[in-house]
Image (cartoon, helix red, strand yellow):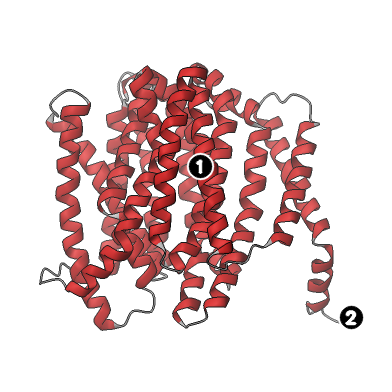
Amino acid sequence: MLIRQTALYLPAQLLGPLAQLVAIVLWTHWLDPGEFGAFTLALAAQEAMYLLFLAFWSYYLLRFLPGSDAAVRERIDVVESWVLIANLALQGSVLALMLRYVAGTPPGAVAFTVLFAFALTRSYCSHLAERTKASNDILAYTALQCGGPIGGLALGWLWAHLVRDGEARIGPLQVLGAYAVAQSASLLFVLLRLRLRWHLQRADRDLLRSVAWYGLPLALSGMLAWVPGNGIRFVVEHELGLAAVGLFAAGWTLGQRACAFAAMLVTAAAFPIALRLEARGEQDRALRQLADNGALLCAVLLPSAAGLVALSTPLSQLAVSTPYVADTIVILPIATLAGLVKNLRNHFANQAFLLARKTGWTLAIDAMETALFLAGAVLGLRALGLAGAAWGALAAVTVGALLSFFLAVRRLGMPLPAAHLARIVAASAAMSAALALLPPLAGWPALIYATAFGGAVYAAALALCYRRHLRGLCARLPFPSR
């Protein structure tokens, strides 16, 4: 079941995040460091507003929509209508305050409209993606995951090549506008498909209490978890300015997005299976399913991170624009390790907390992690520059992940797939050693060859580690008789 569901979700998990990775590279060629810094700050601010004002409801739906009967779904629709209206008003108000007091200037009509449209449509796409995942609507989920990233990249590229003076005329506002248009098109398609309607009658108080008890700690937790991953850009901006944000964000965003891309290839289909088992009262099977999900996650995420660290120098030299290269070479490996740790915690250990409804635990760990980050990033930035800020963030997320896994295994009884993890680590180490033996790489063909070579070494090493399992599988396969 897990492999089948993963295959069905694969286009959404592959194409959208891949477009986001490509976009980060291309925007470094079209935007100078200051403009790129402004663009990444807008992305980070949008994610913060989503986490503050809408994520709690997304988390609630993902957990409780599967298995709900018609009466419960009707009460859910009423609450959702009010939540979406409130989110619209709150995001607009906060955006206006940010432009007025953080940027230091009153918001112009055009800038406010573009930023508001971008933030609102991206938030609603994120929310409805969680809802369609809970409902197992793979087509709608694919449209929401792919439409904005792919359409925004295509429209931005088209803008850059059609304006009169070429690439120099495109700026962060035009890039964000391109994404807003693409996200709006995805939303329109999904809203017509789902036929969602406003239900503005009085909300059910018991449901509101349930939402507050389950979702609000997760929203606060998500906001705290946002700080090490995205808030670091604001720390850099406060200390060194917008240009430094751009130089830092190229390597940091590539590392974070690459790990998220690898993780999302196999996670979208996994957690709903555990939820369905838990809804049937099969708690032990649900926990074992989480362990299987985690093993599959590690099988994809660990070699991806190891390969990216091993090839970070030639990739940085080839991918990003010249002004970004030196900082990206230093920051990309650290960002990759931080992304690896963060995704292992979010998509493995934290899911045991969600299954057991221990959202307060997640909140407490995220509060500790945020405090560690703020201290580590500021001290690291002042002592070692941009690389020091990255090391501070890595240290904070590592402590949070270790504590999360300890609680998930020891307190909640989640099995740890130690035998699978040992094989995956061994195969990843073999791949890293093989890549380290390659001569210096020059040019895209050599980098592509090295990537394929590393993947082949990992697959062969993993097959060797699982040779007994593979023989047993082959013995059970029906082969035609001669």
Kind of residue sitting beneath label 1: Val
Q: Is residue 354 left or right of residue 284?
A: left
Mark 1 neighbour density, 10 Å: few (under 14) some (14–19) many (20 or more)? many
Residue drawn at x 17%, y 72% is 205
Q: Name the residue under label 2.
A: 482
How many numbered tags mark residues here?
2
Q: Which mark is residue 397?
A: 1
Quadrant the C terminus occupies: bottom right
Q: Which of marks 2 and 1 is nearer the N terminus?
A: 1
Q: Look at discs 2 and 1 and give the one toward the viewer.
A: 1
Query: In this orientation, which residue lies closer to the viewer: 91 or 482?
Result: 91
Question: As drawn, which residue projects farthest toward the right?
Answer: 482
- When the figure is inspected, residue 327 is found, relative to residue 178, above or below; the finding is above
Residue drawn at x 66%, y 55% is 299
> Which quadrant of the figure has residue 469?
bottom right
- When the figure is inspected, residue 121 is found, relative to residue 289, above or below; the finding is above
